[in-house]
Image: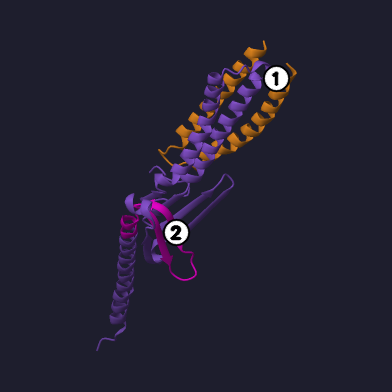
Chain colours: A purple, B orange
Amino acid sequence: MQKMFPDQKEGEAVLVFLRRHWLTFFPSILIIFVLFLIPLVAFLAIRLAGLALGEFRPLVVLGFSSEILMGLAFFVASFIDYYLDVSIVTNQRIIDIEQKGLFNRSIAQQELARVQDVKTRKAGIFQTFFDYGDVFIQTAGEAPNFEFKSVPKPDEAAQKIMALHHDVLEKGYKELEEKLAEPSQEGAEEGLKEIPKI
Amino acid sequence: MTITLVGLIIYFIFLFAFAIFSAFAVYHLFQFGYVGDLCRPVAIGYLVAAGAIILFTLILTLGSVV
């Protein structure tokens, strides 16, 4: 089986894979667009004004080039920040990977059976219209809680997580029942053997 | 000529910093990407675009000097 993410265990299937809604990346795209537009507008302004740059022409070219490269670098940094922030729910656990900039990456994980409560929140016009928001997962005990930020269709995700949690619990109960049933039978048989025949 | 030379030196210093940043960025995209996602295409696109811009800049700058 091909692994979907680096730390995936054997027999672990990815059931929910969430990234932040694309609209949260939109402000970065806007900034990048402006950064790319500045040299073009400046170049057109110089042309229209009929300015003779003379020996400064290479400097202007180098300046515009640096500005575009900085825009490109900003795009990649924003993309990494947006795209490598991932929330994964497998048939065994919940994993929340948060990437902040290039050198700050945190991974939190918890077993699906330890989920206690799942809440969603949609705040503001954009989140309501574009159907995205936060999913809060409360876990048992001292274990850290999870917050999937600005994910698309949060209600659907919450329902799915709860359904998976119930599946895991049911599976756990069945396994426990089977385990409990086995020794009692053995014990009963052994007990019968031990009863002295009259 | 001197102004261009100074500009080019500053540009190359900038390119050095840009190259270090790009190396880290591309490493992240290749290392932490998932199966079938956009990380690899974006990394390759980024390298191609940056290379093309640098090449174009050097051609324009050196072309105007020579």
Q: Is residue A189 magenta?
A: no
Tell me which amino acid carries mark 1: Thr
Q: Position of residue A86 (x, y in %)?
A: 44, 49
Look at the image and give the residue range highlighted in magenta. Answer: A131-160
Residue A133, above or below A83 = below
Tell me which amino acid carries mark 2: Glu
Looking at the image, is mark 2 or mark 1 nearer the viewer? 1
Q: Position of residue A2 (x, y in %)?
A: 40, 42
Which is more toward the observer, A34 or A151?
A34
User: What element does badge 1 sit on?
Assistant: helix
Is the residue at mark 2 from the same chain as the one at mark 1? no
Quadrant location, the C terminus of chain B: top right
Mark 2–mark 1 distance (CA, rounded to whole Å): 52 Å
Q: Residue at x 39, y 47 (%)?
A: A21
Q: Residue furthest top?
A: B66
Q: Which residue is mark 1?
A: B4
Q: Residue at x 56, y 35 (%)?
A: A73
Picture quadrant of residue A128: bottom left
- Is residue B8 found left or right of A89 in the rendered image? right
Q: Which residue is mark 2?
A: A147
Picture quadrant of residue A182: bottom left
**Which mark is drawn over residue A150?**
none
Q: Residue furthest right?
A: B2
- Chain of the residue where label 1 is placed in the rendered structure: B
